[in-house]
Amino acid sequence: MNDPRATQGAALDHLVVAARTLEEGAAWCAATLGVTPASGGRHALMSTHNRVFSVATAAFARAYFEIIAIDADAPPPGRARWFGLDDPALQAALDSGPRLVAWVARVADLDAALAALAAQGIDAGRVLPASRMTPHGELRWRIAVRDDGARLFGGALPTLIEWGEVHPADSLSASGATLAAITLRAPEGSPLRAALDALGIEGARFTNDATAAAFGIELDTPRGRLQIDVPT
């Protein structure tokens, strides 16, 4: 029998910034990063929509940046949305502007990756099939989402995704912004480190000098190098 704790070889796939509206998210990108995100698409499963741009480098192949917002024109999804978007505290926080809320790691075998986390006592959610239509065609993937939509460890534990045959980065041109680093932080003794090790996360820094689990990123942009952190 395969050991569910075996390394899964997860890699950073994309970063998630939530906004009250896509218009606010795009304006934040232009003002803060000097980047205009491309049209993404609508997620019928969650009644959300997005805009995206590449931040890929040799160290973070195929990495991209997602601005996501609740789609006001879509019917309620009948379940909690991903990335904690229905959380009243997050919704209130977005009144002050878009913010980094999560990151997503891609895996080759989503079921095995979830088993690896379950062996650590972590419920990272159920596997859901999802899709969105883009200007370049339809994208399909499988993603793990908790029934309550919650982000784990303050968003420092990534949401897990398994892509179909086409990846969104395949149609994204260089944006002028690239990901320089992602740093995951947790208090001494936090189970976050064991969870990351079980997934075999590649390319992320880890420090245990925090009072609460969180993460931050460094981006090289037309506005210079920027540090963006998830508020704790």
Image (tube, grey):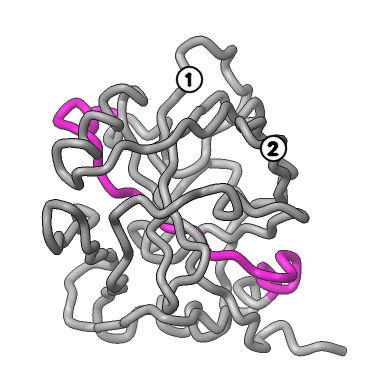
- Residue bounds of the magenta highlight: 91-115
Magenta highlight on residue 16: no
Q: Tell me which residue sits at (55%, 54%) in the image.
A: 169
**Picture quarter with the C terminus:** bottom left
* Amino acid type at mark 1: Asp
Residue 33, numbered label:
none
Q: Position of residue 164 (x, y in %)?
A: 75, 54
Answer with the quarter of the image where residue 5 lies. Answer: bottom right
Q: Tell me which residue sits at (31%, 73%) in the image.
A: 184
Answer with the quarter of the image where residue 209 lies. Answer: bottom left
Residue sitting farthest toward the right: 1
Residue 2 to residue 182: above or below? below
Q: Nearer the viewer, residue 186 or 69?
A: 69
Label 1: which residue? 71
Q: Nearer the viewer, residue 80 or 12?
A: 12
**Picture quarter with the N terminus:** bottom right
Magenta highlight on residue 110: yes
Q: What is the distance, in whole Å, between disc 2 and disc 1 at their CAs?
A: 15 Å
Sequence-earlier tag: 2 or 1: 1
Residue 46 to residue 105: above or below? above
Label 2: which residue? 131
Could you classify mark 1 by the number of other residues whose Cα lies within 10 Å: few (under 14), some (14-19), or many (20 or more)?
some
Q: Tell me which residue sits at (51%, 27%) in the image.
A: 48
Residue 15 to residue 25: above or below? below
Where disc 1 sits, the SS reads loop
Q: Is residue 81 left or right of residue 24?
A: right
* Amino acid type at mark 2: Ser
Residue 126 visible in rendering: no
